[in-house]
Amino acid sequence: MNIPKKWVGRGVALVTGGSAIATVVLVLVVIGIVVQGGWGHLTRDFLLGSPEQGMTKGGIFPAIFGTFLLVTLMSLAGVPVGTITAIYLNEYVGQQSKAGRAIRFAVNTLAGIPAIVFGLFGLGFFINFVGGGADKVLHGGALHWGQPNILWASLTMALLTLPVVIVSVEEAIKTVPRELREGSLALGATRLETIWKVVLPQSMTGILTGAILAISRGAGEVAPILFTGAAYFLPNLPDGLTDQFMELGYHIYIMSTQSVDVEATKPIQFATTLVLLILTFTLNFSAIFLRWHLRGRALR
Amino acid sequence: MNASTKILTRDLNLHYGDKHALRHVDLDIPKNHVTALIGPSGCGKSTFLRCLNRMNDLIESARITGRVEVDGTDIYAKDVDPVLLRRKVGMIFQKSNPFPKSIFENVAYGPRVHGIKDKNRLEEIVERSLRGAALWDEVKDDLSKSGLALSGGQQQRLCIARAIAVDPEVLLMDEPASALDPIATAKIEELIWQLKESYTIVIVTHSMHQASRVSDTTAFFYMGEMVEMGPTQKIFTSPSQKRTEDYITGRFG
């Protein structure tokens, strides 16, 4: 066998280039199908209305609202904890210290746990243990906190997205030059004052990026909220932390598997999927933009 | 200890991991004088400087033994708070490091951290400090401009203004002019000369010319040891140690 090198080179280029193109085509096909199937249905009434007639008619406003509420509560819980963890990792423990390595290992492990396991953990820990325990103490065993609700779902989701926040914030904190920290400390500022007045203001973009990436990840996950708070259908919007909620991803799952007439819900499925895609793409692109902005600053 | 000694070190040793970076340094730094620390790269002069305001505390692998006294107080004693020490012993870095804030906020940073909130008082401190750092006339028209928008020499003077805004007694300068052009350097040197009226200054410099121009006393460091210290005039004309002579005549370094 003696194939000319020229041909080997062309063959490799063909295979690698072909694979790359296939990926792009795949993305375009997915987007194309979703847009084609859902665009026509994307009306004002659909976005602002409630599901009607067994979800074969009407809109998805409760699911949009629920999704926003979920990611807001999730961010309120997850972003501060993630930011504080990132600060601790960078400013208080050494890169090579045992504590630092142990925390990093934990964060990486957390990032690798399947979403459904978070769902089960949320059910076991938040609902049964924390919620059930609270009910025993506060309500004499009557069911109040010990059942799925938006709070437990948000906290479960916050756990899932914690590694995303930690990594993003850490990356931002690392771009703050050591000279600035030393400048502050040399003026007699404490470590906390330095973090508060110099490091954090400089890391704002990174914290925001982390929050957006976490929201984008959270908005696209269904498994963690399956057992912890998402509802099949609710006539009213949630108005308290103990209420259940509807959510876009879960809504798609329900319509495509549990609906009385799956065929009839198809246009709504497509349109709901489109809304979810637009939401996550917008979030991802703004995160990419912020990161790019952040990198630009780090190089300056 | 002499009454006019501001800082004194006795048998000061510093290890970075296995590296013995400072060896048995004994040094008396006189009050309201400019003391220059000279020596080849890696001789320990910057490391020594950073011992004087406990900046080396931030480096994990650094281990310090021996005594450092400021006004007769052992600054490495257990009850000494490095934060309070650093108010008294300020520092100017090799690379100017203004905060990405306005000129006003840069100078007001220290006073604010130390609890001064009154706007009028802050304005007064900012003006006095900028005048003290010979920068006032150049920036007084727009104090809200970013500190980063200033030229390199102006940035370094802003850092000096920021340092003197907290009323320190000692200013440690780590090659403050090494990144500046000759004109900006001359301004900084002139400023150092003025500042010694009110402050005790310790300056690390690579330039022997600079040391001879600005300092009263010079200490020569070599391989982590303080080889020789004396009046600048004497060190540069008739050093008593062979190694000092070799260095200042340019035989190595």
Image (cartoon, grey):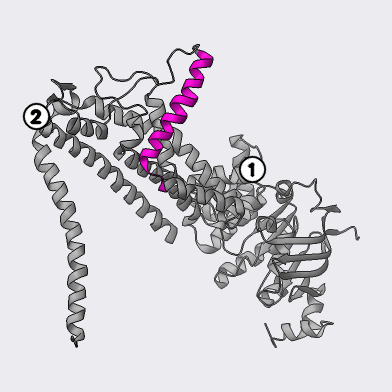
SS for callout 2: helix
Q: Nearer the viewer, residue B196 or A158?
A: A158
Q: Nearer the viewer, residue A26 or B179?
A: A26
Residues at discs 1 and 2 both on one chain? no
> Which disc, if any, is residue A46?
none
Is A62 positioned to the left or the right of B207 in the image? left
Identity of the residue drawn at 49% across and 42% down = A83
Residue A131 in the image, given as x and y percentages of width and height: 46, 22
Q: Residue furthest front?
A: A1
B104 w.r.t. B234: above or below? above
Magenta span: helix, strand or loop, mainly?
helix
- The amino acid sitting under disc 2 is Ala
The image quarter containing residue A63 is: top left
In the rendered image, is residue B145 in sight? no
For disc 1, the marked residue is B111
Residue A215 in the image, given as x and y percentages of width and height: 35, 39
Quarter of the image with the N terminus of chain A in it: bottom left
Q: CA distance from mark 1 to mark 2?
A: 69 Å
Circle 1 packing at 10 Å, graded few (<14), some (14-19), many (20+), is many
Identity of the residue drawn at 12% across and 45% down = A33
Identity of the residue drawn at 17% across and 27% down = A259
Subunit that carries the residue with mark 1: B
- The amino acid sitting under disc 1 is Pro
Residue B129 in the image, given as x and y percentages of width and height: 63, 50
B23 w.r.t. A151: above or below? below
Residue range highlighted in magenta: A112-138
For disc 2, the marked residue is A264
A241 w.r.t. B140: above or below? above
Is B51 positioned to the left or the right of B158 in the image? right
Residue A170 in the image, given as x and y percentages of width and height: 48, 50
Residue A133 in the magenta stretch? The answer is yes
